[in-house]
Amino acid sequence: MGQVDYNHINQLQRQVDQHRASLSTATAEIASIDEKLERLRCAKASVGAIQGDVHQIKVSVMAKRDQPDWKGERKDRLMSSWEEFSHDYRHFQLELDAYYDAICDTITRLENQKYEQQGLIGWCQSMINSLGNEIEKLFHIREG
């Protein structure tokens, strides 16, 4: 009858424990990422809604820009105010666009981190399964 190599079994069991710890860490990381993604997706929707509202305001204001009956100083003040508004609007819209893009980039980065963690989980589960198989075979008493 063959002997059971308990030292080798203990070594394999330590590896299983290490993989389980990695599995637990990856699972916790995914939960954390999911929470961040949820908040970012809400922020993205809010920024998108704000962009739509700002656009509607611009459309409304643009409709009032053309005042064919206005002449002289009144028309000059309108045009000056319009230029100032137009400049400020463009600046604000660029900031909103940059903020929206930054949110999209962060969402993509976190989604990619999540996929990496999911891959790590699959790898750890595969390793635990293989090590469990090796341990089981070592416990199997063989003759010869």
Image: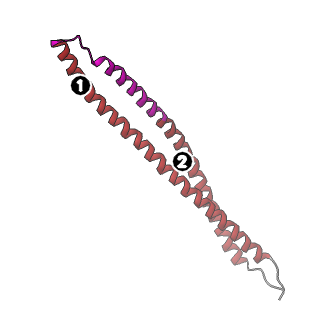
Question: Where is mark 1, residue-wise?
Answer: 84
Q: Quadrant of the N terminus?
A: bottom right
Residue 55 shown in magenta:
yes
Is 10 located above or below residue 107 in the figure? Answer: below
Question: Where is mark 2, residue-wise?
Answer: 33
Residue at x 47%, y 32% (from the top left corner): 46
Percent x, y of residue 83: 23, 25
Specify whether 64 is left or right of 29: left
Farthest-out residue, bottom? 144
Report the label total: 2
Q: Quadrant of the C terminus?
A: bottom right
C-alpha span from label 2 to label 1: 42 Å
Q: Which residues are magenta?
A: 45-72
Percent x, y of residue 124: 63, 63
**Which image quadrant is residue 25 in?**
bottom right
Residue 38 shown in magenta:
no
Residue at x 56%, y 45% (from the top left corner): 34
The amino acid marked with disc number 2 is Ile
Is 99 located above or below residue 83 in the figure? Answer: below
Percent x, y of residue 26: 58, 56
Is 21 located above or below residue 57 in the figure? Answer: below
Specify whether 75 is left or right of 135: left
Local SS, label 1? helix
Pair 2/1: label in front: 1
Residue at x 69%, y 77% (from the top left corner): 8
Mark 1 closeness class: few <14, some 14–19, many ≥20 residues within 10 Å: few
Work out whether residue 78 or residue 12 is closer to the camera in this orientation and state it.
Answer: 78
Percent x, y of residue 9: 71, 74
